[in-house]
Each structure stands twice: as C-alpha cells, then as structure tokens.
Image: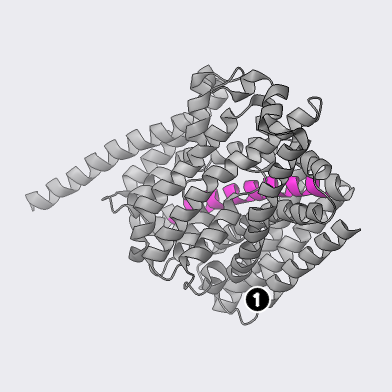
Amino acid sequence: MLDYAIIISYLSAILLVGLWSGKGMKSLQEFSVSHRSYTSIVIFATLSASFIGGGFSIGNAEKVFRVGIVNIVVLWGFSLKELLVAKFIAPKMGNFPDVISVGDIMERGYGTMAKVITGFFSVFLCAGIVGAQVKAMGLIFNVFLDIKPIWGILIGCGIVITYSTVGGMRAVVLTDVIQFCVLAVGIPAALVFGIVKLGGFSAIKAAVPAGHFSIPGEAMTIGVFLSLFFTFLLGETLVPPYVQRLFIGKDATHTARGTMLSGIFSIPFFAITGAIGLVALALDPKLDPNLAMPTVISTVLPAGMRGIVIAGVISIVMSSADSFLNGAATSCINDLVKPLRKNRLSERQELVLAKLTNCLVGVFAVIFAIKIRSVLDILIYAYNFWAPVIVVPLAAVLLGVRVTRAGFLAGIVAGLAGVLTWNGLLRSPVGISGLVIGVLCNLIVFAVTNKLTTSNADSRRCSR
C-alpha cells in the first residue's frame, strides 16, 4: 500500500505541475521553446530526462541480459554524440536566436521545401519514439501495479498527453527536472540493492556467463558492434526535442555547458541500467529479458524505496515521451502546416493546432505501441528515417558550411537509397546497419554536389 500511495502521489504531482505551468501561454513559440532563459543546470536535467527513455533503461537492461555489457558500450555512441554536440554545435546556437524547430534551421540553408521535408521526417521520427516509450509504459504498469498493459498505456500516456498539451515546453521542462531528480536517485539505488542482495559483484560475475563480460561478445561480431555504435552515435543526432533544448538556454554558454553535462552523465547512467540486466540474469537466468529491470526492482527493494524507484522508472518513460510529443507537434505545425498554407494563421490558431497535434500524436503512439515488440529495436528502426536523410545537411548549416539546395536534395536521395537498398534488398550484409551506409551515402553525395554547385555559382559570378 505504501508503494501505491507513493506512485499515485507522484503521478498526481506531475500532472498538477504540468497543468499549472500552462497558465498564460499564448503562442506556438511559447509552446515550443518557452521563454528561452533556462540555465545550464536546467538544460542538463531536461535534456538528460528526455533521452533516458524506455529504450536506454528498460531496453538496455533487456539487451545486456541477452548479450552482455557490449550493449552498454554501443550506447556510449550516444554519449559521444552528446559530447560532440556540446563541443561543436551548441556554442553556435547564438546564430539562430529566433528559430523554434529543426525545419526553421533547414529553411535558412535550403529554402521552404527543405523545411517541409524536414518537418515530415521529424513528425515520423518523434511519433515512432513516443510509441516506444508508450510501449514501455504499459510494461511498467503491468509488472509493478498488476494493471493490464493496455490500461497502463492509457493511464500513463493520458497523463503525459494532458500536461504536455496544456503546458507545452514549460510543462515539459518543469516535469523533466522533477523526473530527472527521481530517476537519478532511484535507478542507481535499485542496482546497489541488487548487488548487495546477491552478495557483491563477484557473486554476480560467477553467476553470469563469462561471454557477457567480453567485447564484442559471443553474440556479436566486430562489424555488428561498430555498426550499432555508429547507429547510436548518429541515430538521435540533432533530433527535434534535443535541438529544441538548444534553443531554450539563456545564452550559448549555458546551452553548451548543459549539453556537455548531459553527455557526461549518460556514460555512468547507461552502465547502471545495463548492470541491472546482469543482476536480473544472476537472479533468474530463465527470466523474460524484457522484465529484467522490473524484476530487479520488485525483488530486491523494500517497501517505500520500491515505490520511489518505480516512480523513477515511470519518470524515465514519461520524460522522454513528453519531449518527443512536443517535438512532433512543433514540427507538424511550424514546418508542415504553416509553410503549406496559403493564408497565414493567427497566434491563437497556431497554438490550438499544436495542442491538437500533440493529442493526436499521442493517440497514434498508443496504437503503434500495441503493435511493437522490443522497445530498443523500434528506436533503431525510427533512426533509419532520420540520420540518413537529415543529419548531414542539418549539421552543415549549424556548422556554418556554405550549402546549396542541390546538395540537400541529392544527399536525401542518396541517403534514402542507401538505407533502403542495404537493409531491404541486401538484407544488411555482415550485420552492418543500413543507417550507417545511408549516412555515408548522404555525406559523400552531399559534399560532392555541394562542392560542384557552389563552384559553378562562383564561376558564373566571376564571368560576369
């Protein structure tokens, strides 16, 4: 009963804070980037809470249970990405003071058509990732509270949709900070209690197959290992919710520092969530891997502490889902609806449409979640339709590279052709992901086309 009381109180508090934060909101810009005055600590907390979703927690524990600590190392590709963004991208955000979406940035480099294309892929990616988080939410409510997954999905997602729709980015940031504090304490506590219960790390090592501690491990070749590492390095690079976090800082210094702290934090946190998978394996080798983290929490923690940790796990999923919902709504209205409409929308119309889109994406995510199986696998699938298309031309604009529309279009065609051919027709030879091939194709074709078209433009100017 104590655990139930803690969880209900926590969910009620999150809902109330989210609803309260929506007071006075009047525009799409407020819905998308709030007041652009957050400090580095707030950016660190909200960014960390956003990316630590079901895939990087429950999914990580599941994969480590199956294949070993190599999955922790491949996730560090994501950590490296955060550090690179903090070093090279975040300091340049002062060059984009008025943008609210990835599409706005792309429009500056390649025009309105690029904004619309980016908006389409942004919505697709965000909706897919929300679906993965919603799936994890159903699992959490089922295991911990003995509620059927479909009802867990409806309850958890209903709360997220409500406060993220009413409060926009302000609600997302405030609830993220609360959720980050809970998960940053609760998840490490579960690992510590698990290690103590099993008699120390040496006992876990003795109970777990030796191959689980080798890299790349028995179930993974070097090629597959490198492919997965680069998949996580590139897959969520500059996705809409993370780019929006680069817009909300007081200045570029706060933005860069917060992003760097988030990248550093992710390194031990991925190790902790993965290690929980080893604890679960030592507890019960016949356990369903998808239940690795929930089983450890249910088994090793005392009442009260268990309620706090369950709240932390719920936080992991909610904080990621709300961010991607907001990213999908912003991209849909700002990058798709506004450019394609002949008549300009009023501020109120933009805000109403964004809130409506937020709700609709959440509903579709619920439907999507019922169909999917592995939380982490669906993340990788969604990545295939972002990185090979958007990352290269977006990074070029952010880094101040001279770009052309021809380079953008040629890169998109090459990236999509690369990933579809490699994954679809060739069936991923030697285990290398089509995402990596798609990004490489985009990079080569974009660079060559961009170089040729800029050179031709310069030649025409000189001839005049």
- Residue bounds of the magenta highlight: 115-141
The quadrant of the image that shows the N terminus is bottom right
Give the residue at x 32% y 52%.
399
Q: Main secondary structure of the magenta part?
A: helix
Q: Amino acid at mark 1?
A: Gly
Residue that sits furthest to the bottom in the current view: 24
Q: Name the residue nearer the viewer: 301 or 123.
A: 301
Residue 136 forms part of the magenta stretch:
yes
Give the residue at x 40% y 55%.
106
**Could you tell me how many numbered marks the image carries?**
1
Residue that sits furthest to the left in the current view: 463
- Look at the picture and state if 205 lies above or below 373: above
- Look at the picture and state if 287 lies above or below 56: above
Q: Label 1, on which residue?
A: 22
Secondary structure category for the residue under label 1: loop
Give the residue at x 34% y 35%.
445
Q: Name the residue nearer the viewer: 303 or 422.
A: 303
Residue 185 location in percent, x, y? 66, 54
In the picture, measured across the screen, residue 147 lies left or right of residue 227, that is right
Asked whether the viewer can see residue 337, the reply is yes
Residue 315 forms part of the magenta stretch:
no
In the picture, measured across the screen, residue 302 lies left or right of residue 182, that is right
- Look at the picture and state if 401 lies above or below 177: above
Q: Name the residue nearer the viewer: 355 or 306.
A: 306
